Image (cartoon, rainbow, N blue to C red):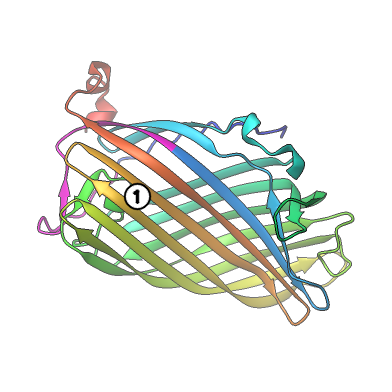
Amino acid sequence: MKYLNYILFFCLLTCCVYAQEDSLYIRTYPQDFTFRPYVYNKFTILSTEIKGQPEASFYPNIPVGVGIGFTYKSYALNLAYAPRFFRDKKKGKTTYIDFQYHYYGRRFLFDLLWQDYKGFYTVEDRKGELYNLHSDVHAVQYGVGGQYLFNYKKFSYRAAFYCDERQVRSAGSFQLGGGLYYNRLETETTPILEGRDRFRNYQLSITGGYVYSWIFKRNYFMTVGLAAGINLGLENVKNSAEKVEVTPNLFPRIAMGYNGDNWALFVNAVINRVYVTQSNNMDIIFDTGRANLMYVQRLNWSPPFLKKIKILNR
């Protein structure tokens, strides 16, 4: 695909059957319609550690984006745009597709990733003013993952990451799940693959962890979650045989802010760290994620035409 200097993100959340929550810990809001302007930053870091060479971190040149979203009951529409002029020209040119979808339900959370980046840079001085450009480095990752929440009646991910309901009391939950990932790395001249020009593998992951929300002065909150596990990967390197490899993974999430009766202001971040390969001679780490600064306004009014659409009012 050609240059994606903008991101137009459309997401229609499907209706789902919510398990009954404990009203002493979780409360929903009566308003059906909300709108939310936000600023976001998607980030990707490709880190390599090769025996006999210094550790290197490769970054794509992607700008900060702005967006606006609307929610009617359990359906949401988000439009986002990353202006080209936000880029620093000294960091080179990156062509990319970056789709990240993070869904937080009552019992389950899901993550979908589709990332395709070509063109990276490295920082060559401590002041961060000298860059080395690597237009030949091409990194691809597709992935899907999910987690089951055990204490779903008392803990709400939605209260922290959507703010469409409120965590009334502090609570937490253990979580368990897994995922599937495909990783590919190609390079022509940058020496990051032990003299080779292509690497790819498939990974099956098993993860578990814990998440907790602290509630302060009724409306202020901070949520911290961490899931970790192992990947069972089938590696294929060009001109070499396939091999099975076991590597770790790490998925932290954090959110904090104010969630009032009619409005909310909060920040949140999701990070996905996958060890693509790990051996005595070479480690490759793929860090991806998204951070948001968001304002949510709840309204007692909703557009009349939405009330006439049967599928939205079941």
Judge from the rendering whether residue 260 lies leftward or rightward of residue 243; answer left or right: left
- Residue 187's quadrant in the figure? bottom right
Q: Position of residue 205 (x, y in %)?
A: 53, 69
Residue at (89%, 67%) from the top-left corner? 195
Residue at (59%, 60%) from the top-left corner? 287
Q: Quadrant of the C terminus?
A: top left
Q: Position of residue 208 (x, y in %)?
A: 41, 72
**Which amino acid does the dot numbered 1 rest on?**
Phe
Q: Position of residue 226 (x, y in %)?
A: 41, 68
Confirm whether residue 139 shows in the render.
yes
Q: Position of residue 295 (x, y in %)?
A: 33, 37
Q: Main SS type for the magenta part?
A: loop
Residue at (38%, 48%) from the top-left corner? 267
Inspect the magenta stretch and tell me whether residue 294 lies in it: no
Q: Count residues near mark 1 (Cα–Cα under 10 Å), then give few for <14, some for 14-19, many for 20+.
A: many
Closer to the camera, 22 or 16? 22
What residue sits right under mark 1 in the picture? 161
Confirm whether residue 105 shows in the render.
no
Residue at (32%, 60%) from the top-left corner? 223
Judge from the rendering whether residue 267 lies leftward or rightward of residue 129; answer left or right: left
Q: In this picture, which residue range is highlighted in magenta? A: 16-38
Judge from the rendering whether residue 305 lies leftward or rightward of residue 255; answer left or right: left
Inspect the magenta stretch and tell me whether residue 37 lies in it: yes
Residue found farthest to the bottom? 280
Q: Secondary structure at mark 1?
A: helix
Q: Quadrant of the N terminus?
A: top right
